[in-house]
Amino acid sequence: MIVTRLAARGIGGLRHWCGRVLASDVTYSFLRQPVVIVAALVSVSIILAAVFAPWVAPQDPFRSAELVLMDAFSEPWSRSDLSGNFYALGADSQGRDVFSAILYGARISLLVGFSAVLFAMVLGTALGLYAGYRGGWPDALIMRVADVQLTFPSILMALLIFGVVRGFLPREMYREAAIIVLIVSIGLADWVQYARTVRGATMVEKSKEYVQAAQVIGLPTFRILLRHVLPNVMRPVLVIGTLGLALAIIAEATLSYLGVGMPPTQPSLGTLIRVGQDYMFAGEWWIALFPGVALLMLALSVNLLGDWLRDVLNPKLR
């Protein structure tokens, strides 16, 4: 009897939550913009295809036993007479199915992008909260470091950090730690925008009555920041994070294209483009074109979602 009541309450709560979501302004704005709907479908399709790549891809490009060297440079939408394999997007110089390589490469690009954005968001939000609430010399120090970093393009900062971190690692450890080094490099290059945004919002929030009341009753600073100030400054952070995801994916592709990112044994989309451009003028255009199109579709769709989210969460535009 108790289980039945709990289940009924759970179903009722789920229906109430779904009703509130469907009736919200965000859902209304989303359903009235076909471009945003298409961008969401493209983003979700690419992410799901990348996550389930071992079941979707017809070939595992990381297993040399599945590669057929005699099928190298097979043209798109062709079937090999030797192995019988069908290559929808062609094959590269190692007989690797380009479609499978794109799916597995997108997994690495998305992993680096999401992790770098999360790392930059946590670091920048923490520093912004502390600087905006504490003020004084900690605020001045953090903001001066941010100002200095803003004078350099983010990709150059990522290259610098990547080179420094790579220099401390032994050569045999680099291949295993390449993803971590990329995440740290891109994250450290992008924390500034989160810190500056959160600092400004925190300076506004700390002068409000609910924060002053929490100070009066003696709540510790960490609890005030975490439970009271942070939820009220997260709206712009989510918007920056959505837009930063596309930039992080492009930054990873740029670093890999320059040869300082993922190694060829673990290719991301940028690595696939770098390897394919060597054969572009030899007539094997599909090796670089299709990974480039996949990267373009992913970055563009995420950017469109970020722009829509920025507009819909801005109260001045309502």
Image (cartoon, rainbow, N blue to C red):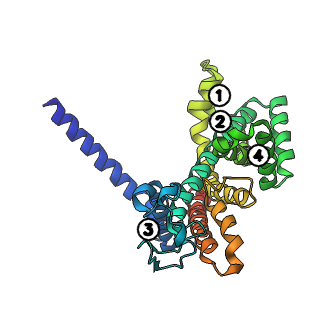
**Do the residues under discs 1 and 2 have CB atoms within 8 angstroms?**
yes
Above or below, 222 relative to 82: above
**CA distance for labels 3 and 2:** 36 Å
Inspect this view and state whether residue 310 appears: yes
- The residue that label 3 is drawn on is 31
**Where residue 49 appears, x then y in whole percent?**
45, 60
At numbered mark 2, what does the secondary structure look like: helix, strand or loop?
loop
At numbered mark 4, what does the secondary structure look like: helix, strand or loop?
helix
- The residue that label 2 is drawn on is 208
- The residue that label 4 is drawn on is 162
Q: For the residues carrying marks 1 and 3, which lies nearer the camera in this image?
A: 3
Inspect this view and state whether residue 121 appears: no
In the image, is 316 to the left or to the right of 31?
A: right
- The residue that label 1 is drawn on is 212
> Image point 58% across, 69% down: which residue?
92
Amino acid type, callout 2: Lys
Q: Earlier in the sequence, mark 4 or mark 3?
A: 3
> Image point 18% across, 35% down: which residue?
5
Q: For the residues carrying marks 4 and 3, which lies nearer the camera in this image?
A: 4
Q: Residues within 10 Å of mark 1 (few under 14, many from 20)?
A: some
Q: How many marks?
A: 4
**CA distance for labels 1 and 2:** 7 Å
Q: Residues within 10 Å of mark 3 (few under 14, many from 20)?
A: few
